[in-house]
Image: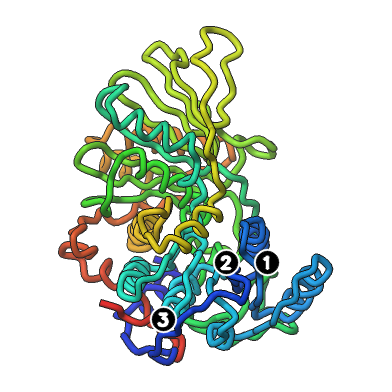
Amino acid sequence: MNQTRRTFLKSSLAATAALSLPARIYSASKGANGDLRFGAVGIRGRGQDNINGLLACKGVRITAICDVDASVLAKAKDELARKGHQVETYTDIRKMLESSEVDLMATATPNHWHALASIWAIQAGKDVYVEKPVSHHVWEGRQIVEAARKYGKICQTGTQSRSSIGLHQAVKWTQEGNLGKLLWARGTCYKRRASIGKVEAEQPWPEGVDKDLWFGPAPITPLRRKQLHYDWHWVWDTGNGDLGNQGIHQMDIARWFMGENALSPALFSIGGRLGYIDDGETPNTMFVVHDYAKAPLIFEVRGLPARANAKDMDSFRGASVGVLLQYEGGRVLVPSYSAAAAFDKEGTMIKRWGTFAAPKDGPDPGAPDNSGQESHYANFVRAVRSRKQSDLTAGILEGHLSSALCHTGNISYLLGRKAAPGAIREKIKADSEALDSFGRMAEHLKLNEVNIEADQLTLGEFLKMDPAIERFIGNAAADKLLTREYRAPFVVPATV
C-alpha cells in the first residue's frame, strides 16, 4: 500500500454527529410574485448548467450565488447582471442559507462538500438539487436521505438520465420481460483522462480562493498539483475518480434497468493508475463487480485511449460511455443519457427509444415516442411545487444508492494489494464475466504500452455487505472507509 492510501485509511474514522449550522428550521417563502427563488453554490462547470437549467423553468428566478473563488463569483455576478438577473453574492454557504430570499439551493461544489451543503440547506428549510455523486462517502449519502425525510424537503439528484422519457420506456419494456432473464449488466466509462502533470513541491494557493472554505469537511493539505480546480476529482480527499465523476451516471442507469434498490451484497475491484506518473491518486483504469443475486453489475473505467498516442477511445459493443445489458433473448444498448435500443439474439434492432438512430440497413423498428419530455430541472421544480417526493425522477435515495456503489468499489480498491496478472486470474477464475473484463483490460493496457507484469494492477479486497444497514460484514477496515473524520466546524451531522 502506498503512502497516499495509508494516509487515507488512517484519516477515515467514525464521524461525529455534531451540528455546524444552527439547528433551526426556516420556513421558506416564495417571492412576492410567486416565483421560486434559488441560490447556486459552486458556480463553475456544472454550476453554470444548474443556473441555466433552473432559469429555463417557468416561475423560477435566481437571487443568490455562492463560491469560494472571488474571481469566479465576480465574473458570474456580472454575467447574470448582463442578462437582467440581480443577485446577492456569498463566499460562505452558511450566510446564503440564512437568506429568506432563497427557497431552493442547487449545489455543484467538489464532491467532498455535496453532503454537508445539502444537509445544511435542508435544515435551513430549502429544497435541494445536488449534483452527482451526492456524497463523498457512503454514510453521508444516507444522512442526506434521512434529512430530506425528517424535514419534508424535496431533494433531486443530478443524474439527468432519470428524466429521459426514452429511458423510462426502455426500462419498463425490459422489466416486463420482453427479452427474458437478465444475465449481466455492464456500465462503461471509457473517457480520456490525460496526465494532470507532476510537481516536485507544494504549489502556491490560488489568490482569491478561501482555503478554509474550499477544504471544508476535508483535511487541509498542501496543494501538490498544478491545478486546484477540476483536478480535485483525482485526489482521494476531495474526489472519487472517474467512477464517481462520469461513471456515476452509467452506474445509475445500470442499476435502474436491473431494478436493484439496495447496495450489492458482495463486490470487488481491480485497477490502477497506469500509463503515466502524475499527481493524481485515483485509478484511471479499473473494473468493479457488484455481485447482485439476480445478475452481476460490472463497471469498467478506462482513461487511456484505444492505443498509445491514439485520439479515439475503446468501445464495448457500441458504447464508450454507456450501458449494455445482456438478456437471455437479446441485449439492450444505452449509449447516452437519453437513448436506448433493443436487439434480438441475431443482433437485429427490434426496438429503439429516445434519440437512438434508426438502423442503416435491416428493418426499422419504428420511431420512438418522446412526447411529454421535460428537463431534469423542470422535474425538480414540478416536485417542489407539488411537495410530492414521488414526482421526482431522481430522488435523493436513488442518488445515494448509485453514488454508494461507486464508493464501495473504491473502498475495495483502497484496501487492495498489487498483484501479478497470473495471481489475479487465479483469484477470479470462477467468475467468467470478471475474467472477460480482466482480459480486455489487460489487452487495452498492452496496446497502451503498459506492462502489467512490471506495473502491477491492484487486486481489490473482496467485500461482503449487509445492504439493510449499509455496513460491511466482518471487515472493520472497510467499515471505517464508509465515512471520514470531518474537520470542525464542517461536520456532516448524523440525522438518524
In the drawing, does residue 490 fall left or right of residue 173? right
Compared with 230, 313 (above or below) is above
**Eye-nearest disc, 3 or 1:** 3
Number of callouts: 3
Residue 93 at x, y percent in the picture: 56, 82
Compared with 236, 368 (above or below) is above
Identify the mark at residue 289; answer none if there is no mark: none
Query: At x 62% / y 46%, what residue is drawn?
Result: 192
Residue at the far left in the pictured view: 474
**Eye-nearest disc, 3 or 2:** 3
Q: In whole angstroms, how far apart are the C-alphas of marks 3 and 1? A: 25 Å
> Around disc 1, counting alpha carbons within 10 Å, would you say few (fewer than 14), some (14 to 19), or many (20 or more)?
some
Sooner in the amino-acid sequence: mark 3 or mark 1: 1
Using the image as rendered, state which of residue 475 and residue 18 is in the foreground.
18
In the drawing, does residue 316 fall left or right of residue 81? left
Rendered image quadrant of residue 331: top left
Sooner in the amino-acid sequence: mark 2 or mark 1: 1
Q: Amino acid at mark 3?
A: Gln
Residue 134 at x, y percent in the picture: 44, 64
Local secondary structure at mark 1: loop
